[in-house]
Image (tube, helix red, strand yellow):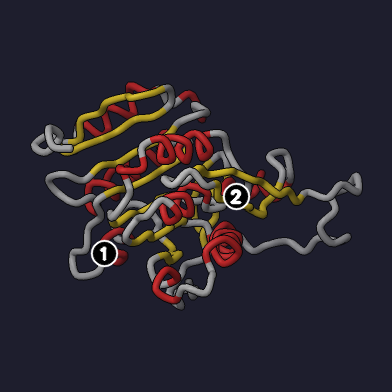
């Protein structure tokens, strides 16, 4: 979970994405202009296969805080619990699989996949501020006394599209499962997202499970499905807000 030295300063704000601007100094610590603490703790109780419950606790910021207005990934959006619940109800999706999460934010879904028995989990975000929170939450929820378990989860920067996705790939390594929750938030982000997924998703049986809760900037579901189809990925919708993309030649398996 060490920060990569080659990471690029990057910001993902609600209205777009791009290289990070120079941060401005703020007075008064974490409080906003009205003296309110913008920080917030989130909890998700994950039911494991043996019937026990694992509480995942995340540290981030309130949805309406200045921090979230500058960097979308530092809060918990509704699509993340939706996707974590889908994984909980269908643990075979990630058990024993290599998992990549794109736009991981505070880390709920990747941590859930880790707890549900994924062979390895790589959690990514492009936003450097979000990556700080992501790494904190992974350390809090996944750093235990099992050294082998620690080595199966890591956090890395991944900016979508070329040339970033090629630099990210290691020896043409591809993933059994790619996860994404509320990651289609501008029309401009859709194409590089699906380029990246298509580049990193294993053929022929890899799956990309996308959860949507908010239709940011009125990006319609049909447009998202079409973006996958253009890259050879067909979509099924097993439940509300869940989109499962599979390679056209491999979707009959599993």
Q: Is residue 251 above or below residue 95?
A: above
* 191 or 204: nearer the viewer: 204
Side (left or right) of 168 relative to 19: left
Could you tell me which quadrant the C terminus lies in? Answer: top left
Q: Which one is earlier in the sequence, the residue at label 1 or at label 2? A: 2
State the residue in front, 137 or 119: 119
Residue 233 is marked as none
Q: Residue at x 60, y 60 (%)?
A: 133
Give me the C-alpha separation between circle 1 and circle 2. 32 Å
Looking at the rendered structure, the secondary structure element under dot 1 is loop
Task: Give the foreground label among 1 and 2.
Answer: 2
Position of 141 compared to 27: left or right? left
Mark 2 Cα shell of 10 Å, populated few (<14), some (14-19), many (≥20) = few
* SS under mark 2: strand
Q: Which residue is mark 1?
A: 169
Name above or below for residue 244 compared with residue 66. above
Q: Is residue 89 above or below residue 96?
A: above
Question: Left of 36 or right of it: where is 236?
Answer: left
Residue 82 screen position, x and y as percent: 49, 33
Q: Position of residue 144 (x, y in %)?
A: 54, 70
The residue lying toward the viewer, choosing from 138 and 231, is: 138
Q: Residue at x 87, y 46 (%)?
A: 36
Can you give x and y, in whole percent of width and height, for residue 219 in the image? 43, 26
The residue shown at (28%, 55%) is 96
Residue at the (38%, 60%) spot, across then down = 122
Front position in the image: 149 or 10: 149
Residue at the disc numbered 2: 55
Quadrant in which residue 130 is drawn: bottom right
Q: Which residue is most to the right?
A: 35
Residue 29, image quadrant: bottom right
Locate residue 75, reporting x and y percent: 63, 46
Residue 250: quarter of image: top left
């Amino acid at each position: 979970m060490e920060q990569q030295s080659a990471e690029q300063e990057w910001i993902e704000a609600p209205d777009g994405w791009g290289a990070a601007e120079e941060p401005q100094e703020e007075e008064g610590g974490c409080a906003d202009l009205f003296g309110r603490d913008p920080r917030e703790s989130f909890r998700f109780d994950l039911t494991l296969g043996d019937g026990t419950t694992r509480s995942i606790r995340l540290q981030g910021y309130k949805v309406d805080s200045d921090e979230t207005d500058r960097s979308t990934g530092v809060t918990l959006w509704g699509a993340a619990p939706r996707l974590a619940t889908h994984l909980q109800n269908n643990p075979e999706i990630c058990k024993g699989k290599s998992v990549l999460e794109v736009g991981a934010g505070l880390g709920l879904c990747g941590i859930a996949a880790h707890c549900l028995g994924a062979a390895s989990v790589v959690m990514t975000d492009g936003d450097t501020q979000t990556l700080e929170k992501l790494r904190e939450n992974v350390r809090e929820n996944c750093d235990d006394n099992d050294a082998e378990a620690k080595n199966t989860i890591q956090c890395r920067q991944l900016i979508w599209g070329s040339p970033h996705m090629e630099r990210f790939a290691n020896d043409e390594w591809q993933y059994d499962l790619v996860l994404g929750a509320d990651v289609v938030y501008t029309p401009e982000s859709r194409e590089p997202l699906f380029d990246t997924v298509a580049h990193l998703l294993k053929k022929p049986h890899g799956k990309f499970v996308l959860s949507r809760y908010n239709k940011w900037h009125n990006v319609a579901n049909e447009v998202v499905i079409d973006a996958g189809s253009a890259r050879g990925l067909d979509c099924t919708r097993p439940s509300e807000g869940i989109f499962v993309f599979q390679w056209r030649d491999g979707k009959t398996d599993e």
